[in-house]
Image (tube, rainbow, N blue to C red):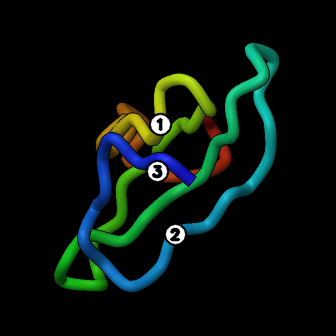
Amino acid sequence: MDRSWHAGGDTSYALGINDSGEVVGYSYLADNVTSHAFTWTASGGMVDLGTLPSGQNTGHI
């Protein structure tokens, strides 16, 4: 898997595929407490979405 962004934590979770065909999920930062949402494509790698406006990292991607 090509990752243009990596959060630095021990764990990332892929949760599904959105309507644009991107893998969506969340990844823990280096502190292994804070997480950020991400999208991933084969051509673009992992893209950090940060903490979403709703304050959630998942479920609203």
Label 1 crowd bin: few (<14), some (14–19), many (20+), radius 10 Å: some
- The foreground one among 13 and 45 is 45
Q: Amino acid at mark 1?
A: Gly
Of the numbered discs 1 and 2, the one sitting upstream in the chain is 2
Q: Residue furthest left?
A: 31
Of badges 3 and 2, nearer the viewer stands 2
The quarter of the picture where the N terminus appears is: bottom right
The residues tagged by marks 1 and 2 sit, at their Cα atoms, a distance apart of: 14 Å
Q: Residue at x 51, y 57 (%)?
A: 26
Residue that label 3 marks:
56
User: Which mark, by number, is residue 45?
Assistant: 1
Disc 2 is placed on an element classified as strand
**Residue 3 at x, y percent in the picture:** 41, 48
**Residue 54 at x, y percent in the picture:** 43, 38
Q: Amino acid at mark 2?
A: Ser
Relative horizontal placement of residue 45, taking residue 30 as reference (left or right)? right
- The foreground one among 33 and 7 is 7
User: Which mark, by number, is residue 28?
Assistant: none
The residues tagged by marks 1 and 3 sit, at their Cα atoms, a distance apart of: 22 Å
The quarter of the picture where the C terminus appears is: top right
Q: Quadrant of residue 22?
A: top right
Residue that label 2 marks:
12
Disc 1 is placed on an element classified as strand
Relative horizontal placement of residue 42, taking residue 56 as reference (left or right)? right
Classify 54 as above or below 21.
below
Q: Quadrant of residue 15?
A: bottom right
Q: Residue at x 47, y 52 (%)?
A: 57
